[in-house]
Image (spheres, coloured by chain):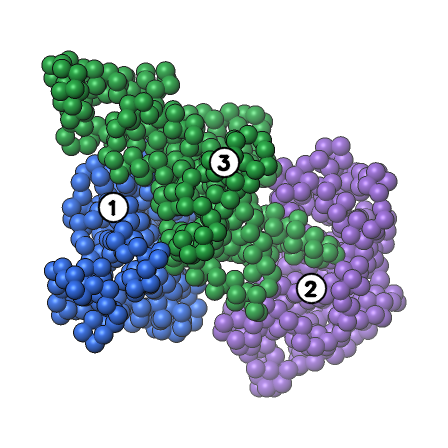
Amino acid sequence: MKENIVEIRDLTVQFKKPRGCLKAANNVDFDLRDGCVTALVGESGSGKSTLAFTLLNIVNTSGEILNGEVLYKGKDILKLEGEELRKFRWKDISMIFQSAQSSLNPLMTVQQHFWETYLAHNPKAREEDVIPRFRQLLADTRLDPDRVLKLYPHELSGGMKQRVMIAFSMLLEPRVIILDEPTTALDVITQDYIFTILDNIHKKTNITMLLLTHDIGVVAKVADRIAVMYAGKIVEVGDIFTVFKDTAHPYSHGLITSAPSLLDRDEIKEPITGTPPDLVELPSGCAFHPRCKFATEVCTKEVPQLIEVAEDHLAACHHVGCLRKEAQADE
Amino acid sequence: MSAKYIFKKIGTSFVTLIAVVIVIFLVLRLMPGDIIEPLARQEAAQMGLTFEEAYQRVADRYNYNPNEPITDQFVRYVKGLLKGDLGTSMINPRNTVSNILAVALPWTIFVVSISLVISFILGMQLGAIMAIKRKGFINNLITFYVTLVSTIPNYIVAIFLSIIFVYQLGMFPKSGVYSINVTPGLNIPFLLSALHHAILPIATYVITSTGGWTLNMKGSSINVLGSDYVFAARARGIPSRTIINKYMKRNAMIPMVTILAMSFGGMIGGAPLIEGQFQYLGMGAYLSKALGERDFILYQGLLLCVSVSVIIANLIADILYSKLDPRIRLE
Amino acid sequence: MNRLLNSIKDFFKVIFRNRQASIGFFILLFFVLMGTIGASITPLDMTVNFEKRFQMPTFQHPLGTDYVGRDVFAQVIHGSRDVLTLGLICGIIALGLGIIMGAVAAFVGGYVDTVLSFIINVSLTIPAFPMMLILAVAFNVQNVWAAGFILAVVSWGGVARVIRGQILSLRYADYIIASRIMGLKNYYIIIKEILPNTVSLLAVQFIGLFQSGISSSMGLMMLGVLTYRPTNWGVMLNLALQNTGIAYNPKGLIYFLTPIICLGLLQLGCIFFSSGVDQALNPRLRTE
């Protein structure tokens, strides 16, 4: 088994809202395996992005990391400060943002962005020495360096911008790259193209990837491992084949079976009923119990912990066996 | 592409100019009563002419005959303007608008533009400080200052400054734009004298208009700080000084530039009061004098000149804007 | 009717929860009472009495007397009525003009928008204050209505531009487009969707016009225009500057400072109140 490059332990991130406190990550334990593509799946607002941002020790405004550790190669990132933290970001872990469209400074060209970031991490560098590298990175994402380097963000199309962001994220040769819904705003063909590029990068560099998405189809195609997040908690995590074949958590089951597929034409979908939880006032016990058909009294009282249901497969549910039983009964 | 943008703006300015000429032309014609009739009577008595002859002479001198149809009057007025005849004083026919313009406009432009530049730069800095440090002593101090100056109109500040520094302390001259003991030209005594006379009007404008810039800049900066591209820049390990200078300030300043021209217009519009208070002989002082003497034709000419300077300021601001924001150049 | 009462109640709930806004509200209330009840119960005697000139404050004259022995206190109270009326008239007319020009431009669009936007721009190009000066003199303004009208005719441009921008941004906002697709009627969209999102803007703009109307009118009066009412604070200030030799005469200080302090306080009240109004009426700022 591969080693963990990132280990998150007991992490809680809280946002102060007028109505009260919102826990976007609630005592989360989560690992990234070196060289693997891990998909972090969940509805909007489940805390995926907040969790991912902590890998760079960065939180959105009004957020606060209450407790926990984020260990990168055994070193706690949350303890980094000032210059040390600044130098760590992007050099070791970089990111492609969900809002690629607006994550570039509108007043700077692509080249200025690249150079600014490079200089921030290599103060003694000279621009003419690194320009060939910029060009190579852009060429790797199938962009025309001569043209693109000189362009301003508003002159790039959505797909181009996303490819620029991919090239940008590889600038300092990080070990881990976070992809926050990298294709959400793009059309299907461009999406496919982007994933091909990412796949090539992965094959070439064996980089660790954390893919945030709500698109199960994408997960099945590119990920080695999957983690499912619900209401600020990881509810199931494991190897992609194991989790897909033998889903242990009712919520993950709902997510996985609701994904459309060309093969299961006639199968009746079982959508997840009910509404996403109110993160300020979470349901007691298991946060999923109001929407869960297996819920019993214990679910309303006790918060389930992640337990090992099989080798390399964890789930947080009081009734991990129920789904398997149901499947057997159907047959 | 930039040239096309500038040409377009010049075209708009020109059309605006035509409209402004029409409006200012109409103001005088809508005035009840015949403003040149008393002058014609006086002329007839002095020169021993018949009233009709005198009236014709006066009408020719002022290029203004209220008995003609309004369209003829307009043609006559525009022809006059094209020949450089902006108007003549009704009190002293030797004083033409052009003469006054030559001695007065440079001083007004001098005072207003220096004030604008100082208050803009000050406001940008203070606003940026307020956006970065949301709380604390400095923030409270700036808030107090901004509230104070926004409650007091600039002419009141001018009264206080003149009472204290001119009349009580005698630190500054009571009137004029430079001392009669110096010879105009590029020599130190003249420049010092000019500055000495201009300091109080400049101080008035700076004290009162810095507040508005500060508040605007604060709001704009807070917006930029919350933007995706600032978040992304932090994730890239860009030093906070760079983020403040190259991201926050530059982006937050862009919407401010659009207000520059309007602010220029407001300052120049307030000149009759400010320059009047310090008896600083710029356009404002002459406007206020012309009004006091009911010298309407002179006033009309001066008002047109002041409006034209605002049109030019608008044009400069537009060009500046296109230089600062790459998104504009595309069009 | 009940709904109206309830929304008034909600409005004041927000205002009183905000310390700054409630201070602003009470300052404004103070001036309103001063201009209505105060002016009705305080006798105003404008007869000249040279013996009593430049008196210090006494029980009989709480703010002393002016350069010809008239009571300053009574003058400033009676002046407040004129100042407030002028501000209101200017605010209402300019807001009305601004709404018409801005809304028509934004809703009709096309060449109507082009023309109206151009007119708005022209009105913003000619410096407002000199324009007010010449209009006030040219039409020989002698009453508060005409004065308010002249101020308004020159100051609507900024409001029109803001309103046009706001409506345009709402018109193309996703939820408005959605309402159109859902087949909702235009007037329904205006009343239910656009108006609620514009009310706070209109209120804040109105307060701004009220403020600028008052300070510009006092500026005009300082230059000897619009002097139809001797107790208006602007005229008081003009007379104080002309007749007391204030630069060297400390005895005239109270007379000179009274209108200035009133103006400052009134402006402060407007600024503070305005911040609360925005909070109370802007759906986006309203938080439960």
Q: Which chain is green?
A: B
Q: Residue at x 28, y 26 (%)?
A: B92
Count of labels shown? 3
Question: Which percent across, then down, holds residue C285?
Answer: 43, 63
**Which quadrant would residue A260 be assigned to in this image?**
bottom right
Three-letter amino acid code at disc 2? Ile
Distance in Å between CA atoms under marks 3 and 1? 33 Å
Q: Nearer the viewer, residue B31 or B111?
A: B111
Q: Which residue is mark 2?
A: A58
Q: Which chain is purple?
A: A
Colour of the chain lettered C: blue
Q: Chain of mark 3?
A: B
Q: Residue at x 47, y 48 (%)?
A: B172
Quadrant where the image shows the N terminus of chain A: bottom right
Q: Is residue B196 left or right of residue A42?
A: left
Question: Which percent across, then down, holds residue C36?
Answer: 18, 65
Q: Chain of mark 1?
A: C
Three-letter amino acid code at disc 3? Asn
Q: Nearer the viewer, residue B288 or C3?
A: B288
Question: Is any atom of residue A93 visible in this view?
Answer: no
Q: Which residue is mark 1?
A: C224
Label 1 secondary element? loop
Quadrant where the image shows the C terminus of chain A: bottom right
Q: Nearer the viewer, residue A36 or B15?
A: B15
Q: Which residue is mark 3?
A: B181
Q: Is residue B107 above or below residue A328?
A: above
